[in-house]
Amino acid sequence: MKKILFTCIMLSGLIFSPVNAQNINNNNQKTRTMKFELPKLPYATNALEPVIGQQTIELHYGKHLQTYITNLNNLIQGTKFENADLETIVKESDGAIFNNAGQTLNHNIYFLSFSPNGGGEPKGKLAEAINAEWGSFENFKKEFVTAGTGVFGSGWVWLAKDNAGKLQITKEPNAGNPITKGLTPLLGFDVWEHAYYLDYQNRRADHLAELWKIIDWNAVEARY
């Protein structure tokens, strides 16, 4: 009986010792730090060539987006956003938290809008909404590219919808996202130079025109 009691005391000491408690706290802290993670691409890093080159994907997705996510996880610790979802953070934050949350959301949508088997035109209700607003898919593409080319400096051009399903094209500077205007983002083209410079140098319009070849309209239609 004494031997059994001694064993129980020793096990209790191991389980509840300060050292083990510290390890648990460290693990919990690590979990909080890694709240947001890099989304898994549904295609290989070279699958979008020649529209987007492998090196661009590896740098843009693997470096730029990862940096935004890491910064965001660090910045929200100890703030009211620590347990908030990404959309809420983008809607309600400002400063550095907004910049990194906005770019995380923007790039998540961006990279998950492509497919090596993409291209063509949207179908169903999204196609109907585009035709109702711009007359044709071709007219929509022209206006979208014109808007993206006209973004001054760095930013994004978005196809977004309001609560009634009506579509509009918005131009957003830097980390901007139409979600801050009460709209739902459906498709975003990144016009920061790091998105296209390795493949197109300063030819932003050429880059935007080529992106239509790899759009995964199934993904975009699902957001609509």
Image: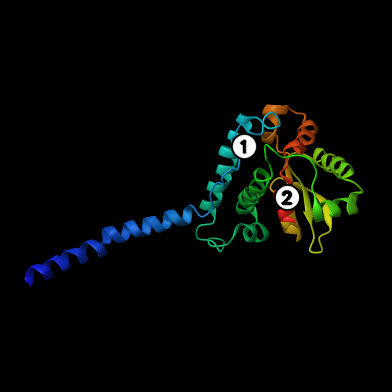
When the figure is inspected, residue 30 is found, relative to residue 153, above or below; the finding is below
Q: In percent of the image, x 7 and y 71: which residue is there?
A: 2
Determine the secondary structure under disc 2. Answer: helix
Q: Position of residue 101 (x, y in %)?
A: 62, 52
Q: Residues within 10 Å of mark 1 (few under 14, many from 20)?
A: some
Q: Is residue 222 left or right of residue 62?
A: right
**Outermost residue toward the left in this view:** 2
For the C terminus, give its image quadrant: bottom right
| Nearer the observer, 130 or 199 | 130
Q: Residue visible at 62% across and 37% down?
A: 60
Dot 2 corresponds to which residue? 220
- Image: 109 above or below 55: below
Q: Earlier in the sequence, mark 2 or mark 1?
A: 1
Which-is-in-front pick, marks 2 and 1? 2
Identity of the residue drawn at 56% across and 51% down:
72
Question: In the rendered view, would you say 37 is above or below 9?
Answer: above
